[in-house]
Image: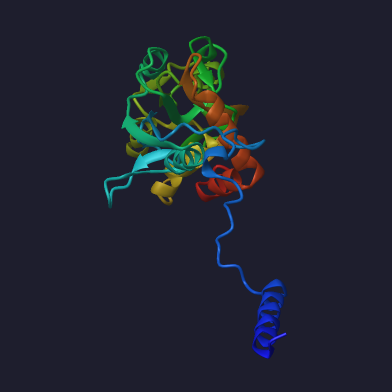
Amino acid sequence: MNKFVLVLSVLVVASLALVGCGATPTTTPPTAIPATVVPTTPPVGALPDLGGKTITVAVENAYPPFNSIDTATGLGVGWDYDTVTEICKRINCVPTFKQAAWDGIFPAMQAGEYDMLADGVTVDIDRAKIVDFSTPYVEVNQYLLVRTAETRTVEQMKADTNAKIGTQIGTTNAIAATAYFTNKTIQSFEDFGAAVLALKSGDIDGVVIDNIAAVGFMNENPGVFKLDGQITTGEKLAFVFPKNSTLEGPVNAALAAMTTDGTLTQLNKKWGLIP
C-alpha cells in the first residue's frame, strides 16, 4: 500500500474515533414539551381564576376597623380593603370599592347593584332569605360602649329609665339593643360614626356595638370611651353576595387558602379582629 494513502487512512480513522468518544454535538436538542401541549387543567387544589374580572365591592367607609377614610390621604383603609385585595390577588380579580349607605344595602345587594358587600356583616337567618353569605371570617360579641367617666354598669343602665341608648339602624346590634333594653326606645342612627359622635357629645349614654368595631372607635378617640358590659355573644361575620352569585365560591376558596397559610390570621391581628 502507498505510505501516503496508509497515513491518510490512519488519520481519518483517528478523527472518527475522536468524534465518537466525546465531541460535543452542534445541533440544539428538541423542546421537551411543546407549548401547544401544556396541560390547561389546573392542578388539584388550585384556586379559581376569574380572568382579571372587575368586581364592585360595597363598603360604608364609616365602620373602623373594617373600613373608613384615612383623613391624611382621603383613601379608604381597613380590614375589608386589605382582605378583599388579597382575595382578588389569589383569584385574579380587580376590586372596585363603592361607598354605600347601610340603610337599604340588602335590597341593593338583592337587586345585584353590587357584586359583594364587605362591611363586618353578621350572618342572619332573615338576611339569608334574600342574600348569600361567605364562609364566616370572625366571631364577635355585642357590648355597650360608654364614655370613660360613666359609673353605671350595663345592668344599672338597663334599669335607669333616664339612660339613653343608641345604635345603627337596621343592624343586628339594633335587634340586640331592643331585646336587652326592653324598657327603652332605642335611638337609631344612619351609621355607627353618628351614634358614637352622639355618645361623645352626651346626647346618648351608650351605644350597642360589637366589640371589634367598639375597639376601632376607641382607638380613633383615645381615652374617650370604654366598654361597659356584654349583651350578646357568638355572632359570625361574613361577606355578602346576591343570591346564586358565581363569586361566592371563588371567595370562599380564597378564604380557605388564606386560613390554611395563616394570612387571614395575620390580617385579623393587624386590624384588631382578634388579639
Name the residue: 52% across, 9% down: 129
Quarter of the image for the N terminus: give it.
bottom right
Image-quadrant location for residue 188? top left
| Residue toward you, 93 or 113 | 93
Residue 171 at what x, y percent from top left? 46, 21
Q: Which residue lies furthest to the bottom in this view?
A: 3
Quarter of the image holding residue 216? top left
Q: Nearer the viewer, residue 166 or 271?
A: 271
Q: Which of 183 and 191 is in front in this view?
A: 191
| Residue 116 x %, y % | 43, 26
| Direction from residue 113 to residue 186 in the image, left or right | right
From this viewpoint, is residue 7 visible?
yes
Task: Report whether residue 137 is seen.
Answer: no
Query: Which residue is at 33% across, 24% downward?
Result: 101
Q: Where is residue 25 in the image (x, y as percent from the top left)?
A: 60, 68
How far across and down, in percent of the image, does residue 43 sit? 64, 37
